[in-house]
Amino acid sequence: MASQSFSDLIAQAEAEGTSFDTHPEGEFNGVILNVRSDQTQNGKHRVGVQWRTDAGTLWDNIIFSPENPKAVSMFLLNLKNYGIEKDFLARIDTDETGFATIADAISKTKEGQPATVTVKHRKNRQNPENPWVDIKKVTFIGGEAPPVAAESAPVAAPAEDAASVDRPW
């Protein structure tokens, strides 16, 4: 692979609208650019939603931690921002195919649809000068995200019960 200078790469990224600053807090107009499913370095399943807002681009990484009931509740609440409801999830498994199904459903129903996105900062204990950036609320233009039809998900084995709680922040 040919070598390229970082100066050239930075100029190219800036020309495409990339900022190297932390996305500010607040309410912004935005649109989903990309949705993917993958795994974190710790092997946890993740659904990643890339946004372009008035203030730049950011990712909403929704991580599934089945060993922690509060984290499962947060996962379910975060998916609800994108119209993914319990009846849809009850029809799929918690494997790679299931998470790909979730990402595909969000992509097909929400990608490119204008929305208002509420962004908040959260303290990063390892690097206090660089806070974690979280998407707290998504309102698709024309109202809340309509639920993804449960019928569009493949039928899976019965899912285990997962409690839902309010977000702690």
Image (cartoon, grey):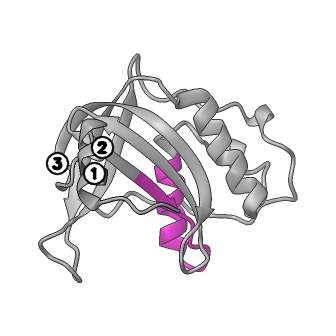
Amino acid type, callout 1: Asp
| Label disc, if present, on residue 25 of the rendered structure | 3
Q: Nearer the viewer, residue 66 or 122?
A: 122
Badge 1 element:
helix
- Please give the residue where the numbered disc 1 appears in the rendered image: 8
The residue shown at (78%, 40%) is: 153
- Cα gap from disc 1 to disc 3, whole angstroms: 29 Å
Residue 123 sits above or below residue 167 on the image: below
- Whether tag 2 and tag 1 are in contact, CB under 8 A, the answer is yes
User: How many other residues sit within 10 Å of disc 1, few (<14), some (14-19) or many (≥20)?
Assistant: few
Q: Residue 123 at x, y = what percent?
A: 19, 71
Badge 3 element:
loop
| Label disc, if present, on residue 12 of the rendered structure | 2
User: How many other residues sit within 10 Å of disc 2, few (<14), some (14-19) or many (≥20)?
Assistant: few
Amino acid type, callout 3: Glu
- Dot 2 or dot 3, earlier in sequence: 2
- Cα gap from disc 2 to disc 1, whole angstroms: 6 Å
- Cα gap from disc 2 to disc 3, whole angstroms: 26 Å
The residue shown at (80%, 33%) is: 151
Q: Residue 126 at x, y = what percent?
A: 23, 83
- Dot 1 or dot 3, earlier in sequence: 1
Q: Residue 38 at x, y = what percent?
A: 61, 61
Amino acid type, callout 2: Gln
Q: Which residues are magenta?
A: 60-79
Q: Residue 56 at x, y = what percent?
A: 25, 41
Instruction: From the viewer's perspective, tell me whether residue 108 is left or right of residue 12.
Output: right
The residue shown at (57%, 63%) is: 163
